[in-house]
Image (spheres, rainbow, N blue to C red):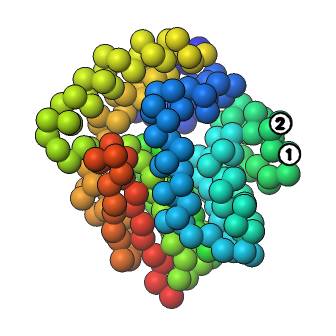
Amino acid sequence: MTRASLDKQPHEVASMFDGVAERYDLTNDVLSLGQDRRWRKEVAKAVDARPAQKVLDLAAGTGTSSLPFARTGAYVVPCDFSQGMLRVGKRNNTWLPYTAGDATRLPFRDDTFDAVTISFGLRNVQDFDTALREMYRVTRPGGRVVICEFSHPTWAPFRTVYTEYLMRALPPVARAVSSNPDAYVYLAESIRAWPDQPALAERLREAGWSKVAWRNLTGGVVTLHRGFKQS
């Protein structure tokens, strides 16, 4: 199976996620020690989807992240560029409008969505600055973006322990539960190489977003970033 490299060639990343699609949700639950469920709840609160609003869920994978938005009565579009992920999602939730799409070239019109969100996917986009601008383009004026991504723990001793877990413990655990453990070696490497909280906030501002703010979860292991498109 494919393991993407840190230059994040789109075909490599898509193929890698195709290869882990069948057990992706289970593997994430195990590797995060169940924290992924809490993180999804916090994303849902931050997005604050309302009935009849349109929500774009990017890098939605199998659509697990889209379900909380749908339960509010919002119209949610799960979008991903991994055909394997989309197939698994469509099999499990046939009623969701799964859409194949690249975050750097979104197949939607300007000013379409009330909210755009992406969880643990921006890190896998080769040119994420272009993706941030595309998210801005398809968001209606007054709308919002919510990004949930692995980040940098704020407490130095914990940051050291966390880095050791990523590089030493995560790959062996992945071998036990994942269909493609090499994908989780890439995961660990890509997390270590990702910008910290202030740096990502600045990239959001450069893409046009205003009122940019972030909130750390689990001591900064994960961070929620939010921004708004001016009316």
Nearer-the-camera pick, 84 or 213:
213
Residue type at mark 2 is: Arg
Q: Which residue appears at 56% of the width and 60% of the height?
A: 44
Q: Position of residue 138 (x, y in %)?
A: 60, 69
Residue 195 visible (yes or no)? no
Q: Which residue appears at 17% of the width and 44% of the height?
A: 155
Residue 86 visible (yes or no)? yes
Q: Which residue appears at 74% of the width and 50% of the height?
A: 99
Q: Is residue 96 above or below residue 164?
A: below
Say few, some or many: other residues with alpha carbon within 10 Å of mark 1 (under 14 / 14 to 19 / 20 or more). Answer: few
Residue type at mark 1 is: Thr
Q: Quadrant of residue 189?
A: top left
Nearer-the-camera pick, 171 or 100:
171
Left or right, residue 127 beside residue 117:
left
Cα gap from disc 1 to disc 2, whole angstroms: 6 Å
Please identify the residue farthest to the right as the structure is shown: 94
Q: Is residue 31 above or below residue 48?
A: above
Q: Position of residue 60 (x, y in %)?
A: 63, 47
Report the residue marked by disc 2: 91
Q: Which residue appears at 55% of the width and 82% of the height?
A: 141
Report the residue marked by disc 1: 94
Q: Are marks 1 and 2 in contact (CB under 8 Å)?
A: yes
Q: Position of residue 204 (x, y in %)?
A: 37, 64
Say few, some or many: other residues with alpha carbon within 10 Å of mark 2 (under 14 / 14 to 19 / 20 or more). Answer: few
Please identify the residue farthest to the left as the structure is shown: 156
> Quarter of the image containing the N terminus?
top right
